[in-house]
Image: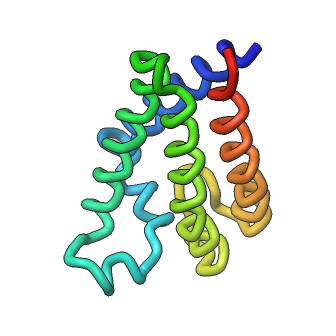
Amino acid sequence: MRTVARWALASAMIFAGLSHLLWGRGAFQAQVPDWTTERTPLDKDAVVVASGVVEVMLGAALVVLPESRGRVGAILAAFFIAVFPGNIEQYAKKRDGFGLDTDRKRLVRLFFQPALVVWAWWSTRGR
């Protein structure tokens, strides 16, 4: 069961990363907190591209680095925690993006982030 969950997570991460890089770049900018562009030299597009690259790399690592799956899972869980402020800001500032066009949808999305953390952690532990 963990193997199926890990492969599904890897597939989802690669898909999400590619969408950050290609067809969803504009929509994902709604999740980039304003402080990232105010306190760094990056614009929102650069943050989206960087996070897309990280997502593709982590998704691929779940598959191609089986001996490091525990470490990759921990890094992925930390990544999900690190991007959570963007989800909160999208909700708080009522920003539409990739179908999250109501307060209710944006609020429900917030509850999925802890599930992603658990999924990353659980699916990469044990054999």
Q: How is the image coloured?
A: rainbow
Residue sitting nearer the eye, 108 or 70:
70
Q: Is residue 31 above or below residue 69?
A: below
Residue closest to the far bottom? 38
Most foreground residue, 23 or 18: 18
User: Residue 100: percent from the left, percent from the top?
Assistant: 64, 57
- In the picture provided, is 1 more to the left or to the right than 53? right
Number of numbered callouts drawn: 0
Residue shown at the point (52%, 60%) measured from the top left: 83
Q: Position of residue 58 (x, y in %)?
A: 43, 35
Horizontal relation, residue 5 to residue 13: left or right: right
Residue 41 position within the rendered picture, expressed as x and y whole percent measured from the top left: 20, 77
From the image, which quarter does the N terminus lie in?
A: top right
Would you place residue 9 above or below residue 34 in this image?
A: above
In percent of the image, x 70 and y 62: which residue is there?
106
At a point 41% along the width and 62% down the height, the residue shown is 29
Left of 48 or right of it: where is 124? right
Tell which of 83 and 99 is nearer to you. Answer: 83
Q: Image height check: is 49 above or below 104?
A: above
* Residue found at x 35% / y 56%: 48
- Is 92 placed above or below 96 here? below
Q: Quadrant of the C terminus?
A: top right
- Furthest toward the left, the residue is 41
Q: Kindly indicate the quadrant of the structure image that contains residue 109.
A: bottom right
Q: Position of residue 28 (x, y in %)?
A: 44, 56
Residue 101, by quadrant, is bottom right
